[in-house]
Image: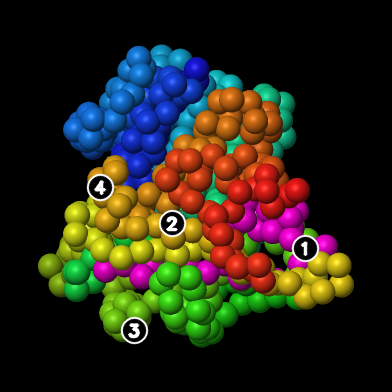
């Protein structure tokens, strides 16, 4: 059994904690730490409310500023945690990773590191921060698994699996992310607005013909006919997984498309044009200094509050095109997640659910040794089959649509 320390107590941490508790046979004590200990306690209460059977392990809340490396190291040692699931804000990655390297605990996260004072991470992305610690992880024999939510995370594994199972040569991977759900509010973001808007206010990078192409947000649109959720309009968007997949998979075209409704785009454009999405402070006539983005965040609904009453489904997947035995092939590997079912099971909406389940599946594969590689990796560098199999049993079922039809993806059957 491996004890787990979860850093952060937001939407994704909530799901991760529930899933760790459901798998308490493999994962031992579960510790949840954030600056606001009340949020950690509320997660523990919700696990107890759901009556999820967790085994003999302890469930404990801790107050921690995870930017404080020494305090994080002390907590890892005091709780005897062998696995740290970092699902706090992306500003924490490098301090938490350092604490793991110095204590020997395995490290997992779900987003690329960001510096609070930069608009959004710029090229070379992982190379700015995480990958600089590769040798240190190797020397310490520490498994550091980067970006193992849904996107990044599962979509990286889908790309790897497509290459292994269906193609001799892949020409393109289009990652398509559609939230066809409805939260019923005038305007809201599904996770931290500060992080959400950063994704859309900077340059959009895509990997085209083996090189980076820069575009503006909402410059390129594309319609897709997706299973279950139907026809949706998406826009070319920059995303973490492109930065590692372009390096690790040898595929010439990798793009990320996110679905947006016209209403979202209108509100976003108004806020952005007025300067209300800026993280640069402005001074009011009264002399107060305020950060516009922080004001917008303060007035928008708390993403966690969207979960009750959220209806509809998400559909996220990889559309992969290439050749097999000289014949052109097209395969879509995808997942459908239902907001209401996620709420019923763990009290969260599907965006948090699709990010929280994979990181726990990955922690379990580290705990049982399958993915405990003792160095730093991105998801597509690991065998995707056990990961996809485990998630199928944990509530995130992978499906595949190709010339043979549409079916649940059972990796062992496909690889025969
Ligand atoms: P939230 O904003 O809901 O939660 C972030 C948590 O981090 C809060 O509980 C906050 O609590 C805590 N936190 C912030 N600063 C510190 C600190 N210095 N020390 C300790 N805790 C801190 O975010 P989400 O749960 O929505 O997302 C979590 C992560 O998952 C983010 O990195 C996000 O980008 C990523 N994500 C990844 C997805 C994927 O598919 N790969 C999808 C969705 C999200 P407090 O303020 O009390 O400290």
Q: Nearer the viewer, mark 1 or mark 3?
A: 1
Disc 3 is placed on an element classified as: helix
Q: Residues within 10 Å of mark 1 (few under 14, many from 20)?
A: many
Magenta residue span: 155-182
Disc 4 is placed on an element classified as: helix
Q: CA distance from mark 2 to mark 1?
A: 42 Å
Give the total number of marks visible in the rendering. Answer: 4
| Magenta span contains residue 203 | no
Q: Nearer the viewer, mark 2 or mark 1?
A: 1
Residue underneath mark 4: 344
Residue 102 or residue 391, whichever sits in front: 391
Disc 1 is placed on an element classified as: loop
Q: CA distance from mark 3 to mark 4?
A: 30 Å
Disc 2 is placed on an element classified as: loop
Q: CA distance from mark 3 to mark 2?
A: 30 Å
Residue underneath mark 1: 167
Residue underneath mark 3: 262
Residue 48 place in picture, x, y as percent: 22, 29
């Amino acid at each position: 059994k491996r004890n787990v320390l979860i850093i952060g107590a937001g939407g994704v941490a909530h799901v991760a904690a529930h899933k760790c508790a459901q798998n308490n046979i493999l994962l031992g004590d579960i510790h949840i730490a954030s600056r606001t200990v009340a949020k950690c306690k509320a997660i523990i209460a919700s696990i107890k409310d759901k009556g999820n059977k967790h085994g003999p392990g302890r469930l404990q809340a801790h107050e921690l500023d995870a930017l404080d490396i020494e305090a994080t190291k002390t907590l890892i040692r005091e709780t005897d945690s062998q696995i740290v699931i970092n699902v706090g804000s992306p500003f924490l990655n490098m301090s938490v990773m350092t604490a793991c390297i110095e204590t020997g605990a395995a490290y997992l996260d779900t987003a690329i590191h960001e510096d609070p004072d930069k608009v959004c991470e710029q090229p070379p992305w992982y190379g700015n921060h995480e990958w600089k610690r590769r040798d240190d992880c190797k020397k310490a024999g520490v498994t550091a698994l980067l970006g193992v939510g849904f996107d990044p995370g599962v979509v990286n594994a889908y790309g790897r699996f497509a290459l292994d199972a269906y193609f001799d040569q892949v020409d393109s991977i289009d990652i398509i992310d559609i939230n066809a759900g409805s939260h019923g509010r005038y305007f809201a973001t599904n996770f931290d607005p500060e992080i959400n808007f950063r994704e859309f206010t900077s340059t959009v990078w895509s990997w085209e013909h083996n090189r980076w192409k820069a575009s503006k947000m909402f410059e390129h649109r594309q319609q897709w006919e997706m299973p279950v959720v139907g026809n949706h309009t998406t826009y070319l968007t920059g995303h973490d997984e492109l930065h590692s997949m372009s390096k690790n998979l040898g595929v010439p075209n990798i793009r990320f498309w996110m679905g947006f409704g016209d209403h979202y785009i209108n509100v976003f454009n108004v806020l952005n044009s007025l300067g209300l999405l800026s993280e640069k402070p402005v001074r009011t006539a009264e002399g107060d200094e305020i950060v516009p983005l922080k004001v917008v965040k303060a007035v928008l609904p708390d993403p966690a509050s969207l979960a009750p009453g959220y209806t509809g489904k998400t559909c996220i997947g990889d559309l992969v095109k290439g050749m097999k035995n000289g014949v052109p092939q097209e395969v879509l590997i995808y997942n459908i997640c239902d907001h209401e079912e996620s709420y019923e099971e763990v009290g969260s909406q599907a965006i948090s659910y699709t990010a929280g389940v994979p990181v726990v599946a990955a922690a379990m594969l580290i705990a049982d040794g399958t993915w405990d590689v003792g160095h730093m990796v991105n998801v597509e560098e690991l065998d995707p089959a056990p990961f996809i199999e485990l998630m199928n049993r944990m509530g995130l079922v992978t499906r595949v649509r190709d010339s043979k039809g549409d079916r649940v993806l059972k990796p062992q059957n496909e690889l025969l």
